[in-house]
Amino acid sequence: MTNLLKRGVGGLLRLTGLQYWPVRVRTGVAAGARWTLYPWSAYWRGTHEPALQRALVGLGDIRGWTCWDLGAHFGLYSVGLARRAGPTGEVAAFEPNPASFARLERHRRMNGLETLRLFPAAVSDRAGSADLLTYGDLGSTTTHLAYEDETLGAETRPIGVPTVVLDELVDAGKIRPPQFIKVDVEGHAHKALAGAARTLAAHRPILIVAFHSPAEVAGVQALLTPLGYESMVIATDSGSADPVIGHDLLFTPRPR
């Protein structure tokens, strides 16, 4: 299919509402879940991030677990984890992009997942608000809070979003301490996890973290290494030549 034809089909799907046509996720961590046809059809076709999906399935029997999904996007992993955790488990999913959050909420409703709790916010080390940089495209998977060295300009087209601190949500009883955390927050993982430092130290969950910047790598390693975590790179098809940036790492706590 040519690019021109793809754009034409995509426009037709958006304009007619066919993007919401219900389908089933074919394979992967959310296999069998109800989904919407378009966009990001790789989600329901089962071809999105296959190595990461295998790692999530490889967690084994997670019935009753609490999982956090930081940077949930449309909720492929949130929905998959919630279905696997079952009625006694809980998944807390965080997504600050309003367009992505709307689709996340739709997928939660389509699957009747009462144990999937949604938060329209970015996770950080400070509660309040921040600018989500969109570069004019809320439909992108790469909207993000500013990188340390990022210059803000008219082209970033920021929108204000709330920020939350995970330790504070745990203290207030709004979310349960996790057995597993998935983090993909476009360069902000070190600050997101800094806001969960007390919970990490007390409960030592398994983590999978996607890395996008040197500051993110250094900050996460500085936080997790003293807690006795070991890391392993999950092979991905990102094309990144860097051994860490552009990849996902699995962090597991060594027995005490």
Image: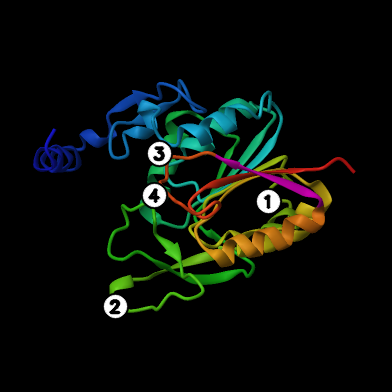
Q: Per the image, is 233 magenta?
A: yes
**Upstream in sequence: badge 4 or badge 1:** 4
Which residue does the numbered mark 3 point to in the structure image? Answer: 106
Q: Residues within 10 Å of mark 3 (few under 14, many from 20)?
A: some
- Of residues 216 and 203, the one nearer the viewer is 216
Q: Residues within 10 Å of mark 1 (few under 14, many from 20)?
A: few
Q: Per the image, is 93 magenta?
A: no
**Upstream in sequence: badge 4 or badge 2:** 4
- Of residues 3 and 164, the one nearer the viewer is 3
Which residue does the numbered mark 1 point to in the structure image? Answer: 174
Q: Give the Cα separation between the discs numbered 2 and 1.
A: 37 Å
The answer to whether the residues at label 4 and label 1 have Cβ atoms under 8 Å apart is no
**Upstream in sequence: badge 2 or badge 1:** 2
**Any mark on residue 154, and which?**
2
Residue 82 seen anywhere in this rendered image of the structure: no
Instruction: Give percent across and percent down for residue 22.
Output: 32, 26
Q: Nearer the viewer, mark 4 or mark 1?
A: 4
Identity of the residue drawn at 65% across and 40% down: 67
Question: Helix, strand, or loop for circle 3?
Answer: helix
Q: Can you say whether 236 is above or below 170 in the image?
A: above
- Of residues 229 and 99, the one nearer the viewer is 229
Q: Can you say whether 238 is above or below 169 in the image?
A: above
Which residue does the numbered mark 4 point to in the structure image? Answer: 100
Q: Give the Cα separation between the discs numbered 4 and 1.
A: 22 Å
In which quadrant of the rendered view does residue 195 lie? Answer: bottom right
